Amino acid sequence: MPMELSTFFQQLANAMSLGSLYALIAIGYTMVYGILRLINFAHGDVFMLGAYFAFYAITLLAMPWWIAFAVALGLTAVFGMGLERMAYRPLRDSPKISVMISAIGASFLIQNLGVVIFGGRPKSFPSIPLFDTVVRFGPVSVLSVSLFIPVVTLVSLIVLLYIVNQTKTGLAMRAVSTDLDAARLMAIDVNRTVSITFGIGSFLAALGGIMWTMKYPQLNPLMGVMPGLKCFIAAVIGGIGNIQGAVLGGFILGALEILIVAFLPELTGYRDAFAFVLLIVVLLVKPAGLLGKAQAVKV
Amino acid sequence: MLKIDNLSVHYGGIHALQGIGFEVPDGKIVTLIGANGAGKSTTLKAIIGLVAASSGSVSWNGEDLTGMMTKDIVKKGVVLVPEGRRVFPNLTVDENLSLGAFSRTDKPVVASDRDKVFSLFPRLKERMKQKAGTLSGGEQQMLAVGRALMTRPKLLMMDEPSLGLAPLIVKMIFDIVREINKEGTTVLLIEQNAKAALEVADRGYVLETGRITLTGTGKELLADDRVRSAYLGEAG
Ligand SMILES: Nc1ncnc2c1ncn2[C@@H]1O[C@H](COP(=O)(O)OP(=O)(O)O)[C@@H](O)[C@H]1O
Ligand SMILES: [Mg+2]
């Protein structure tokens, strides 16, 4: 099969935007894991909520899109902090398995509340001209939102790395994620630090969710399940706990998915299985993930 | 003054502290000695709120610390250099010191305190940008002490600072403990190295399986037959 150059660029653009979205969501998993050694199974559902909040802010409250997005991002961040407060903090000193069960419970609760409140029928996201114009580069045509997505992701990543590595809050986050008790001895407010981490992770999930619904303009209460699972895998592939790793994992997963579907169309039906195959392969070769450090299990 | 009264701690079914009481008067060095597993670390953790007391009380200058969060206790000037040093290995020496001063807002004084730490431990200055995990054990202990000093402790508690260190470094650490104390910081020192601890201490307490069995001045305990045979490795 001769590959047209234009096809290649077309798919590259798709891969870049899907990879960016995966990266944004994967960051939330990795940050929460880094700080609490907890897999926040509800993260995909937080992503879904971000999209719905934006949807209702535009359709129900008739807000201009940029105000609606800001409101949705803020609300989702607060929701994520509330989730931590109610589902995880009371179990901070409980066995890992209890926290995990709580996370799975929270995920089901949010999904089912979504079905009850938003309705199970898919909704279509309103059109925003800035984001759903088709842009042509010669034979290559992409939706304008697909051009925004990598840029927004890059900017978010830069801001995030600045916060983590250059600010006092970031220093507290790094301390808490290394040694909880030692962080307490530094007079760090551990609860506040964990809360901020959930806030940031949920903000990024909402950002991903909103851009996702503009690219694939449908919403349903279970829309977070598959991206959530894949982005968790992306975070593990990159080395869970490592922000750059999550981004790398997100891009690898996004790119592979698009390219395999594009160039081996007969495998399209297995699209969602690639992530798992990749996960197994990476874990066999590098058990700590691509950028993760081999780490002794904490006892 | 730190006052411990009838303090008990349980870990599940283990009764690790069985109603101990002692005092650390202002400006003094007090030491708690005892064998491995006696409950020394548990005592310090209970004081600073890392483990919950099941009964009894800890009071600091008349204020009850029991049930308070660790961060709030630290802000009151009660600071712990934990067992095993617990520096942040993935952070630089400089960042570790900044964490010591995390709750402080008096920036200029923090800067001069940092200089002071560097003058006490010039080695730390040389390794300022290095990850703490790459330091030797002795350097990590210096960092742990330096980091604690960045908190401006009123009461400095140290959990086995000499553990696993070369004699020269142990001497250096004890010299610095003395110096810190001379400048007005109260010290509560925990050691298995009973001799070194009793030599610097104004008062010592012997802890055995969760109970205090003996107390006296450092000199008295050094001369006590039971201490000599059990903790100083001498025939009784
Ligand atoms: N986290 C814990 N869980 C259960 N038991 C513990 C824990 N920490 C300490 N213990 C037990 O409590 C007792 C006192 O321990 P510790 O205070 O560490 O003694 P020391 O510091 O004097 O060596 C020991 O029997 C120890 O096994
Ligand atoms: Mg101990």
Image (cartoon, rainbow, N blue to C red):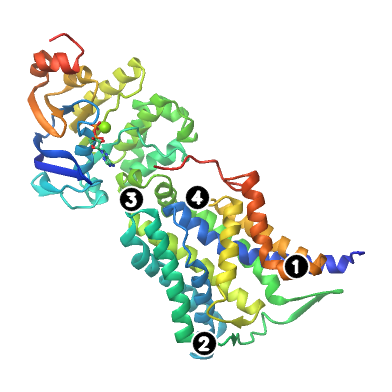
Residue at figure coordinates x 12%, y 20% from the top left: B218
> Which residue is situated farthest in the top direction here?
B235
Q: Please name which of the two marks, 4 or 3, marks the residue nearer to the observer.
A: 3
Q: Describe the element under mark 2 as helix, strand or loop.
A: loop
Position of residue A172 relative to residue B217, above or below, is below
Instruction: Between residue B170 and residue A251, name the one nearer to us.
Output: A251
**Within 10 angstroms of label 1, few (less than 14), some, or many (20 or more) residues?**
many
Is tag 4's residue or tag 3's residue first in the polypeptide sequence?
4
> Which residue is situated farthest in the front direction here?
B13
> Which quadrant of the frame does ligand 1 lie within?
top left
Q: Which residue is mark 2?
A: A63
Pointer 1 chain: A
Mark 1 and mark 2, same subunit?
A: yes
Q: Using the image, tell me which numbered label, if any, was put on residue A13.
A: 1
Between the residue at mark 4 and the residue at mark 2, the CA separation in whole angstroms equals 35 Å
Instruction: Between residue B173 and residue A230, name the one nearer to us.
Output: A230
Q: Using the image, tell me which numbered label, if any, was put on residue A158.
A: none
Q: Which residue is mark 3?
A: A188
Quadrant the N terminus of chain A occupies:
bottom right
Whole-percent x and y of residue B16?
A: 19, 38
Identified by mark 4, the residue type is Asn
Q: Is residue A24 visible?
A: no
Instruction: Between residue A17 and residue B115, name the one nearer to us.
Output: A17
Between the residue at mark 4 and the residue at mark 1, the CA separation in whole angstroms equals 30 Å
Q: Describe the element under mark 4 as helix, strand or loop.
A: helix
Mark 4 and mark 2, same subunit?
A: yes
Left or right side of A26 for A144: right
Identified by mark 3, the residue type is Ile
Is tag 4's residue or tag 2's residue first in the polypeptide sequence?
2
Mark 4 and mark 1, same subunit?
A: yes
